[in-house]
Image (cartoon, helix red, strand yellow):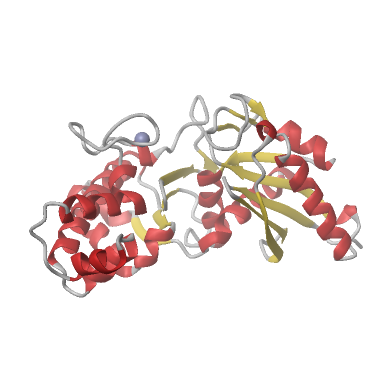
């Protein structure tokens, strides 16, 4: 009998992650291809289909082994139609029929969802969510992504734009510009870029001595990792910056929990590699602003799947379709 695999695809602006995944969520093969966004993004789905076919051939697998392709894409997606509404860096026109394009390129059933939502589904299925039916995932990376799962399903909203936690306003006046066109979004303070921006703002006040200022002097720039490491070593400026980050995250997550009372709020993305220091500090702030019944039942946790969350969640879309 042929294998029963699902192709999970996590489409990024520069690289695309692809994995063959079993119905139990086990990753059998995973690899990456560059994302070619030239020619108005017309090569993207054909390149993915080609990469999948080549890998199947190389493994000596027949096409019957693939049940479908699930894909996470960086933008708001209308799940029913598989239309991606707008994306900045892939070359596609607004309202691009991504599911249709993928299905015709690969001659397989496809399902498409927003990438942060896929990460949330991945964590629900195989990660920190541990099967929880009510889950909120926040991805703290270059930007801040969010995915909300209620009763086991992604909350889509009217326009596929629900769960955009990164664009909740946290600085109402005089906030930094955000990629979305607003100012003062959570993303401008809690993403890796936001943390570096806050730190540079403090450092530019010029009165700083200490580890972080030293790292800036030596390297000419700092990363969010520098901020976390300096803070851990007792640097006052880095700790001041992170105190602000933890406050905004705790405040926003408590407000979300007061609305949804999820089983878990999962923190993922590169920034979450700071680990328990981040988790404990955000939890402390969360506890201040969460309604008592929510505080006692909604738990904060670190994501466990790392970069695999997206492909796993994308594969889950197909598994879920097949199970219906
Ligand atoms: Zn924004």
Q: Quadrant of the C terminus?
A: top right
Percent of width and height locating residue 288? 17, 52
Q: Is residue 135 above or below residue 275?
A: above
Q: Tell me which corner region of the image, top left, top right, bottom left or bottom right, holds residue 95.
A: top right
Quadrant where ligand 1 appears: top left
* 112 relative to 302 in the view: left or right: right
Q: How many labels, in total?
A: 0
Q: Kindly identify the residue that appears in the image at 30 percent across and 61 percent down.
A: 222
Q: Kindly identify the residue that appears in the image at 11 percent across and 67 percent down.
A: 209
Q: Kindly identify the residue that appears in the image at 88 percent across and 60 percent down.
A: 57
Percent of width and height locating residue 260? 37, 41
Percent of width and height locating residue 46? 78, 41
Tell me if I can see residue 280 in this picture.
no
Q: Tell me which corner region of the image, top left, top right, bottom left or bottom right, holds residue 148.
A: top left
Tell me if I can see residue 309 in this picture.
yes
Q: Kindly identify the residue that appears in the image at 85 percent across and 40 percent down.
A: 107
From this viewpoint, which residue is outermost toward the bottom? 233
* 199 relative to 125 in the view: left or right: left
Q: Is residue 248 above or below residue 126?
A: above
| Along the viewing direction, whichever of 107 and 183 lies nearer the viewer | 183
Q: Quadrant of the N terminus?
A: bottom right
Percent of width and height locating residue 194? 31, 49
From this viewpoint, which residue is outermost toward the left? 207
């Amino acid at each position: 009998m042929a294998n029963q695999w699902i192709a999970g695809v996590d489409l990024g602006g520069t690289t695309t992650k692809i994995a063959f995944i079993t119905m139990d969520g086990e990753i059998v093969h995973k690899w990456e291809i560059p994302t070619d966004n030239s020619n108005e993004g017309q090569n993207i789905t054909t390149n993915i289909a080609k990469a999948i076919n080549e890998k199947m051939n190389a493994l000596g697998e027949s096409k019957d082994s693939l049940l479908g392709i699930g894909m996470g894409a960086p933008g708001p997606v209308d799940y029913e139609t598989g239309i991606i509404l707008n994306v900045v860096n892939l070359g596609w026109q607004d309202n691009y029929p991504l599911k249709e394009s993928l299905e015709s390129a690969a001659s397989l059933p496809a399902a498409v969802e927003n990438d942060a939502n896929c990460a949330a589904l991945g964590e629900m299925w195989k990660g920190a969510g541990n099967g929880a039916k009510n889950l909120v995932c926040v991805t703290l990376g270059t930007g801040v992504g969010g995915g909300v799962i209620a009763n086991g399903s992604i909350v889509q909203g009217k326009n596929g734009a629900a769960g955009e936690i990164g664009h909740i306003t946290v600085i109402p006046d005089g906030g930094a510009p955000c990629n979305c066109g607003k100012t003062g979004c959570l993303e401008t303070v809690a993403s890796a870029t936001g943390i570096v921006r806050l730190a540079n703002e403090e450092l530019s006040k010029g009165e700083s001595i200490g580890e972080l200022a030293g790292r800036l002097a030596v390297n000419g720039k700092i990363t969010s990792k520098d901020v976390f490491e300096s803070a851990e070593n007792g640097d006052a400026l880095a700790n001041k910056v992170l105190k602000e980050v933890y406050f905004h995250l705790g405040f926003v997550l408590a407000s979300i929990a007061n609305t949804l009372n999820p089983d878990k709020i999962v923190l993922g993305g590169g920034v979450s590699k700071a680990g328990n220091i981040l988790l404990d500090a955000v939890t402390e702030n969360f506890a201040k602003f969460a309604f008592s019944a929510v505080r006692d039942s909604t738990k904060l946790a670190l994501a466990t799947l790392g970069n695999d969350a997206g492909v796993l969640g994308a594969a889950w879309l197909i598994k879920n379709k097949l199970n219906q």
